Amino acid sequence: MIKLDKVTKRYGETVAVRDLSLEVNDGEVCVLIGPSGCGKTTTLRMVNRLVEPTSGSISVNGKEVLATNPEQLRRSIGYAIQSVGLFPHMTVAANIATVPELLHWDKARVAERVTELLNLVSLKPAEYAGKYPAQLSGGEAQRIGVARALACNPRLIVCDEPISALDVSIQAQIINLLEDLQEQSRDLSYLFIAHDLSVVRHISNRVAVMYLGRIMEVCRSRVLYENPLHPYTRALLSAVPIADPVVEETRERIILKGEVPSPLNPPSGCSFHPRCFMAIPECAEAVPPLRDVGDDHYVACIRV
Ligand SMILES: Nc1ncnc2c1ncn2[C@@H]1O[C@H](COP(=O)(O)OP(=O)(O)OP(=O)(O)O)[C@@H](O)[C@H]1O
Ligand code: SF4
Ligand SMILES: [Mg+2]
C-alpha cells in the first residue's frame, strides 16, 4: 500500500505538488491524470525516492520512504518511465540486470531472469540480449524498460507514461502483460501516469485527477467515467470519443478557455477558477478542500 499524506514539493519558487494526500491499496491500479506540469511525475519520483518531498510523509507498505534504505526500495518498487532511461553504453541484458545485480543475485540467476523477462515482453532473447539501446526501436526500448521494472518481482510498479510512445498494438500487448501479472499476483499494485483516457478507463481501478499540483477529484474509475463531478474532469472526459455512435452523436464537448497557469504564480482560491465554466466570485477566495461526496468519491469544488 502507498500512502501520501499532505505532501508538498517545491523546486525553488515552483510548487510542483501541494498538500497532496492519496492512498493506493494492495492490488489496486491507480492512475494519475492531469495537464502537463501539474506534478504527476514529481509525485511518482517522490514515491520512488528519486526526489524528496519538502514536507509531508510518504509510506510504502507501512514504511516511511525516507527511512527506507534505497536498496530495499528498489526491491519493492519497479519503475518504468516514458523516456525509458536505458543506459546507452550497456546491452539490453545488462540494462535489465541492473536491479538484480544491485541486490547481489548470483550470475546464473540473473541470466535466467533476463531470458525470462525478454520472453515475457515478446522479444527473442537470442536476438535482443546483446543489442544496445541505440539499436532498438522506440517500442522495443519501452518494452525493455517494462522488463527492467519487473526484474525483481516488485509488489508495486510505478509507471510514468510507460506506453504513450508506443503504437496501439504494442500498447495493448503491454497493458495485457501488466494485467496478466496482476492476475498472477493479486496484491501487486500499480501507480501509473497515463494520458489516453480510453486506456485509463480500461486499466485503472482508481483515478486521481490533478491540476496545478493538487488533486481535484479522486474515485473509482467506473464512478469517474460515469459521474465526473469536478468541472475540470468533466471537460477532460467530454473530449473522449464514445464507442456507441448514438451517444457519440449527442456528446457535448466542453472547451476550456485559456491555458493552465504557471505553477510559479497560481491563481488564488481554486486554482482552476480562471478557466472554470461554473466559477462564481467565491471560487477565488479559498482553496476548496477535497471533500467526501460518498461512494469513496472525493472532489475539490465548492459547487459540487
Ligand atoms: N527538477 C526540477 N526543477 C525545477 N522544477 C521542476 C523540476 N521538475 C519538475 N519541475 C516543475 O514542477 C512542475 C511539475 O512537473 P512534473 O514533471 O511533475 O509535471 P507532469 O505533471 O509530470 O507534466 P508532464 O505531463 O508534462 O510530464 C512543473 O512546473 C515543472 O516545470
Ligand atoms: S471551486 Fe469554483 S472554480 Fe473551482 S472547480 Fe469548483 S466551481 Fe470551478
Ligand atoms: Mg511527467
Image (cartoon, rainbow, N blue to C red):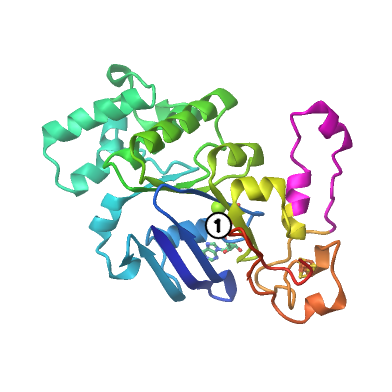
Q: Name the residue under label 1.
A: 40
What residue is rendered at 31% in x and 46% in y?
154
Q: Nearer the viewer, residue 83 or 177?
A: 177
Residue 242, placed above or below residue 20: above
In the image, taking residue 95 as reference, residue 270 lies left or right, namely right
What residue is rendered at 44% in x and 41% in y?
84
Q: Is mark 1 within 8 Å of ligand 1?
A: yes
Q: Nearer the viewer, residue 102 or 255?
A: 255
- The percent coordinates of residue 270 (x first, y second) are 73, 72
What residue is rendered at 65% in x and 37% in y?
198
Residue 67, placed above or below residue 258: below
Q: Which of 276 and 13 is in front in this view?
A: 276
In the image, taking residue 254 as reference, residue 243 lies left or right, namely left
Q: Is mark 1 on a helix, strand or loop?
A: helix
In the image, taking residue 28 as reference, residue 218 lies left or right, namely right
The amino acid type, in three-letter code, at marker 1 is: Lys
- The percent coordinates of residue 166 (x first, y second) are 55, 31
The quarter of the rendered structure image containing the C terminus is: bottom right
- Using a 10 Å C-alpha cutoff, classify the residue at mark 1 as few (fewer than 14 neighbours), some (14 to 19) or many (20 or more): many
Residue 256 part of the magenta segment: yes
In the image, taking residue 278 as reference, residue 66 lies left or right, namely left
Residue range corresponding to the magenta coloring: 234-257
- The percent coordinates of residue 151 (x first, y second) are 29, 39
Residue 299 part of the magenta segment: no
The quarter of the rendered structure image containing the N terminus is: bottom left
Quarter where residue 302 is shown? bottom right
What residue is rendered at 85% in x and 29% in y?
246
Let me know if residue 208 appears in the view: no
Let me know if residue 58 appears in the view: yes
